[in-house]
Amino acid sequence: MEIRKAEMNDQVRSVLREIGAQLDRNCFPTIHNGGVVVPSSAPVVATALGTETANATRRPIGPPTGSWEGSTSWQRTAGRPRTTRSTSSATCQRFRAAYEAQLTEVWSAYPETSVWFQDGGMWLLTNSSVLSGLGKSATFLVAIPFDPQLRVRSWGFWTTAIGVSWIGPRHTNWPDGDICAYTPTDGTWRPGGNLVTLLDLNTLWAVRQLHLEEFDRWPGYHSAPHPFERLTELRDDEFCGCENGSLLYRDCCKSADLAEDRASIALHFSRNYMRNGHRAPPHDLVAFALRRSDPPQLNAFLCAQ
């Protein structure tokens, strides 16, 4: 069900604008319990990103949004499954125990979280307020395999009293529309990592999506390594998604991207990234987000790192 955009009140809009301005300055917001994002009162240096403060109700957050296929060179073939070595049962049990041990922390940071265990992994369904007074919340479905060679995947939906609507398509993957909240090659979050940090990254991704929805601009640095992706998705006044993307797109890669053969880069992007050419969460996931019970089989949504 599509959720119509609601009018945002001036106070919430002002907070969102300030968060976006801080992200543009590479200063990252703070996330309170329940997933409430507020502007930072002090700059967060890069070495502290993703760590927690002494007060567990107030967490700085901030790696740039990335693409799962976000290599520094767009010529790299990406997005295709590959064979992995078998993972021992003992390793999977160790990762399961590590995740289970974090659930008390997860429920403290995100009280509206439900957990389902299945063979080989678990589902989290988490509600994030995103901004105080927003009028809608973000629901995240997180598929967590116990095999560390399989990647954790998340999907985001806007939720109101009348329905759910997929948050996307910017910074989501083909074909299932799962979230690109960070660049995996940067080591921002790895299998076995802190689940609250993962949920905070998803919440920050939702704030950026909200800024795009309200102000027609993606705030802060991000990753968009392929010229076709940049040409079709980036605004001139957004930061360029290349490896040196601290400049605005119009001042960085736009001229070079326009000089590329459009048909050639579109074909390359389609073959290596888009797969079936359609990007949206499967019906089973949309239904899961709506009914908030009876999750689909996890194994259908797991894939290799």
Image: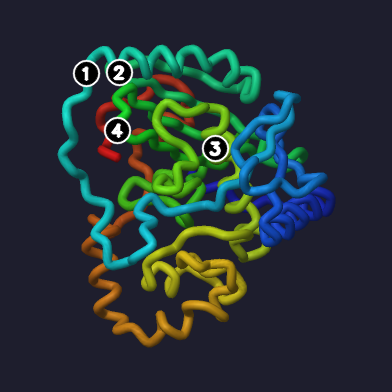
Q: Please state which amino acid type lies under the numbered disc 3.
A: Gly
Q: What's the CA distance linking mark 4 and mark 3? A: 31 Å
Q: Secondary structure at mark 2?
A: helix
Judge depth for marks 2 and 3 and give the one in front. 2
Element assignment for label 4:
loop
- Report x, y in % for residue 238: 59, 69
Q: Is residue 291 left or right of residue 129?
A: left
The answer to whether residue 154 is seen in the rendering is yes
**Residue at 37% over, 19% down:** 95
- Give the residue at mark 1: 88
Q: Does the CB distance between marks 2 and 1 fall below 8 Å?
A: yes
Name which quarter of the figure residue 67 lies in. Answer: bottom left
First along the sequence among labels 4 and 3: 4
Q: Which mark is residue 163?
A: 3
The quadrant of the image that shows the C terminus is top left
N-terminal label among 2 and 3: 2
What secondary structure is marked by label 1? loop
N-term-proximal mark, 4 vs 1: 1
- Whichever of callouts 3 and 1 sits on the residue coming sooner in the sequence is 1
Choose the circle earlier in sequence order: 4 or 2: 2
